[in-house]
Amino acid sequence: MTIRQLSIFIENQSGTLQKVLELIKQLRIQIIACTIADTAEYGIFRIICSEPDRACRELKAVGVAVAISDVFAVELDNQPGGAADVVGRFSGAGVGITYMYAFLIDGRGILVFRTDQADKAREVIEKGGLHCLTEKDLPVNA
Amino acid sequence: MIWNPTKECMSREQMRELQGKRLHKIVEYVYHNVPFYRNKLQEMDLSPDDIRTIDDITKLPFTTKKDLRDNYPFGLQAAPQSEIIRIHASSGTTGNPTIVGYTRKDISIWSECMARSLTSFGVTRNDIFSVSYGYGLFTGGLGAHNGVETVGASVVPASTGNTEKHARLIRDLGISGIACTPSYALYLAETMDKLGITKDQIKLRIGAFGAEPWTENMRTEIQNRLGLKGFNIYGLSEIMGPSVSYECDEQHGSHINEDHFFPEIIDPVTLEPLPLGQTGELVFTTLTKEGMPVLRYRTRDLCSLLPGDCPCGRTNVRMSAIQGRTDDMLIIRGINVFPSQVESVVLTMEEFAPLYMLIVDRVNNLDTLMVQVELRPDYFNATLDTPAAISELEKRFADKLRSVLSINAKVQIKAPGTIERSQGKSTHVIDKRKLY
């Protein structure tokens, strides 16, 4: 029901993002979606990518502060209010969204998010019949 | 004015005789009351009877900050606990502070030395005097407080913090004297500007500035902005607190209360005494202290003793301004900070690599300290991957630092590999202030 995401700690300085992207390129890892949670001094660079386990291992080996975690990736029907309806189900059940971002696969909107209560979130997804992506659904070209 | 002409203006011969007598007495006292010193003297095959004149002082062993740390908390205390009426604490080089206990007589001598200093600055019983050193474990606040009361001026125990209120009190009460760190004086001047309080609305005429090094440029700026005359006062808690030495109207060096604190200047490498006038490490022996007397305590401060007579009439020897340190101690907002203290905190946090950098600066005349640490790649995990979690970690680290350093530090968490790796101790610090 979940897919894996990498979180990379980078400093908020010019050149740091480029350095990490270059490392990912050298590992021949494909980035499918990404976002940055930024503060004045640092950012958390979050990516959905091909071969997340290998990417995490190899980045750690060269001294990058990287963590791997599970996030939900829910498909939206491409209508106005689609995101509101999905998030509404979670908040209605008392589940908080820790962070969220979105990307497209073949024109379909995908909402990626982490919740503060993973088990309860799974219940909401099952009961609501929401469609969750698995890693097989990701458009990996490698 | 001179508070105690008998002691401040005695002939050099009389002074040396008095110092010699007192030195013999204090060596005898520690020999019988402090096992640490008895052992040291016995190892050197010395008995108190070998110390008869002040020149014999060079036979005695040195005391270092490390000795104080190794004997934490009361190992160097000579008086029984029942005789101790106050305990102060200053920064140690690692987690443990340096503890100094004072007997009633110690407090009375300290007050006397403070009164000599304040009188030398021109303070009289007609002044309203605010003490704006921190009151607490730090010796500055209570030390200066006792001195002002001894002189008989009206003491306003303003302490630090709430500078706006303090600025208004200075105007409204007609406060005429102030004791604080020189950087706080500049901060106060800025606060007054902000409040629209002008120089002609206040009556400040005397400033007793110490607890941190300062330059002649700072003196000029403080004097211009606050309309007072600023005097240097020097001290350290291991010896007593503020008033170990003090400036006179000549403002050419600070007179040492050498009937109580005997100064020497040594070469910090060979430990040999240096001729008068040469710059080296300042060493003090307390000649009359009961609570925690120290023999030849190495202050790590670099300065010289000034030859020649002072036109003010005082005969007690003067020391130059402090020209640097022989160790890596920093003085930040008047508080002593050792990089090793920061290191001891960093080592308790498994999220961080055992690396750190202290960045000290002065912004709007207030010292700032930033501590940079590095995340360890293997401790970065999914529970840390939000800004909220990182700032929680920053806060936890900052809290631990505050409890060890007694000052607030800004914390910056850096990515792995970004803090420079090197051997030398000094590379742990970037001090952007120009203090010496």
Image (tube, coloured by chain):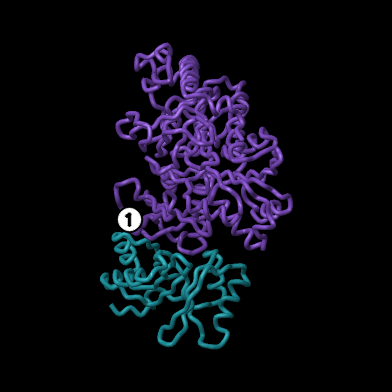
Q: State the quadrant of the N terminus of chain B.
A: top right
Residue nearest the observer in this picture, A25 or A93: A25
For the point 39% across and 17% down, which residue is it?
B41
Q: Position of residue B48 (x, y in %)?
A: 43, 13
Please name the residue that numbered disc 1 is placed on.
B420
Q: Secondary structure at mark 1?
A: loop
Colour cyan, chain: A
Q: Is residue A131 visible?
A: yes
Compared to residue B312, the image places residue B9 above or below, namely above
Which residue reaches farthest top? B49
Question: Where on the picture, by quarter, is residue A34?
Answer: bottom left
Compared to residue A137, the image places residue A20 above or below, namely above
Residue nearest the observer in this picture, B61 or B313: B313
Residue nearest the observer in this picture, B374 or B293: B293
Q: Residues within 10 Å of mark 1 (few under 14, many from 20)?
A: few
Task: Judge left or right: residue A15 versus residue B87.
Answer: left
Q: Is residue B236 visible?
A: no
Task: Judge left or right: residue A93 versus residue A26.
Answer: right
Q: Position of residue B225 (x, y in %)?
A: 58, 57
Compared to residue B157, the image places residue B85 above or below, namely above
Residue nearest the observer in this picture, B253 or B299: B253
Which residue reaches farthest front? B311
Q: Amino acid at mark 1?
A: Glu
Question: Where on the picture, by quarter, is residue B329?
Answer: top left
Compared to residue A17, the image places residue B379 above or below, namely above
Colour purple, chain: B
Q: Position of residue A99 (x, y in %)?
A: 51, 70
Q: Position of residue B70 (x, y in %)?
A: 43, 29
For the point 46% across and 44% down, which residue is it?
B337
Q: Chain of mark 1?
A: B
